[in-house]
Image (spheres, rainbow, N blue to C red):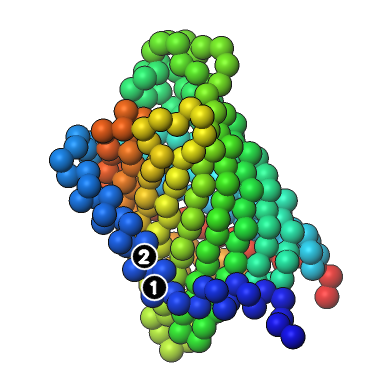
Amino acid sequence: MMKPGSVYTTFFSAPLAKLFCSLFIFFTCIVNAQTKQTELSQQIWLGYFKQTRFSDKWGMWADVHLRTKEDFFTNFSQGIVRAGLTYYLTDDAKLTAGYAYVNHFPAEAHKNISQPEHRPWQQIQWHTKFPKLRLMQWFRMEERWRRRILNNDELAEGYSFNFRLRYNFFSQFPLSKKRFQPTTLSFVVNDEVHINFGKQIVNNYFDQNRFFLGFNYHVNKHDNLQVGYMNVFQQLAAGNRYRSTSTARVFYFHNLDIRKK
């Protein structure tokens, strides 16, 4: 009999194929956009993630983000607070549903005000472990309710709405003989594709691609610090405009298991 969760391992047991597929999508988007208008910017992304497991079946997800706007240290672009309730299918596969509040700091279309966004989300996430390789993947669905903008100084009534589907493929390779143990380093390759859809989406079904290279420091058995470079390649609402953002990304992951032994 097939063990619970083995369907995930079987179907996603070709990590290099998945990695090459993500890289192909990323570089194809860049090539296709070379003849179009592309803006360049530089940002810093800071993030804190906490996953707490209460029992064999239930847990909680929380994360907080702060992102700068341009030239790495100039103003802020986004602040995000996200929470969710997690149901564990197995130790390596779980479902999460929750809510995120996003604050879009003053930007081009609203220079003097922030734009709020309400974002319910649902996700399936799974892990695959090999002796010299660790993989994490998720599919996430988001429902994005963004407040309409009247002008640079005022918000309008109502919200724009669209769905967004995200696929995240994360891989890490140990850099020492003590693989994935506390105080060791791993090399990280991560790619995440975002796709928009809904009645209000006309030009930018492809939203963005995030490609990350960096290092994972295993602080202890539960916590990890990730530092590295990320390119965010995004299609803007006009359809023929793109933004390529060089990003210094620093994420801290705190995993807590409070199940009774």
Q: Residue 17 shows which numbered tag?
A: 1
Residue 217 higher or lower than 178, as above or below: above
Q: At numbered mark 2, what does the secondary structure look like: helix, strand or loop?
A: helix
Q: What percent of the width, then of the height, locates residue 154?
A: 47, 10
Q: Label 1 to label 2, Cα distance in Å?
A: 6 Å
* Residue designated by label 2: 21
Amino acid type, mark 1: Ala
Q: Quadrant of residue 186?
A: bottom left
201 sits left or right of 232 in the view: right
Which quarter of the image is occupied by the C terminus? bottom right
Residue 214 seen by the camera: no
User: Identity of the amino acid at label 2?
Assistant: Cys
Give residue 146's position: percent from left, percent from top: 53, 26
Query: Pointer 1 and pointer 2: residues touching (CB < 8 Å)?
Result: yes
68 lies above or below 28: above
The residue positioned 36% from the left and 65% from the top of the image is 21
Q: How many marks?
A: 2
Who's the residue at 27% across and 37% down the image?
242
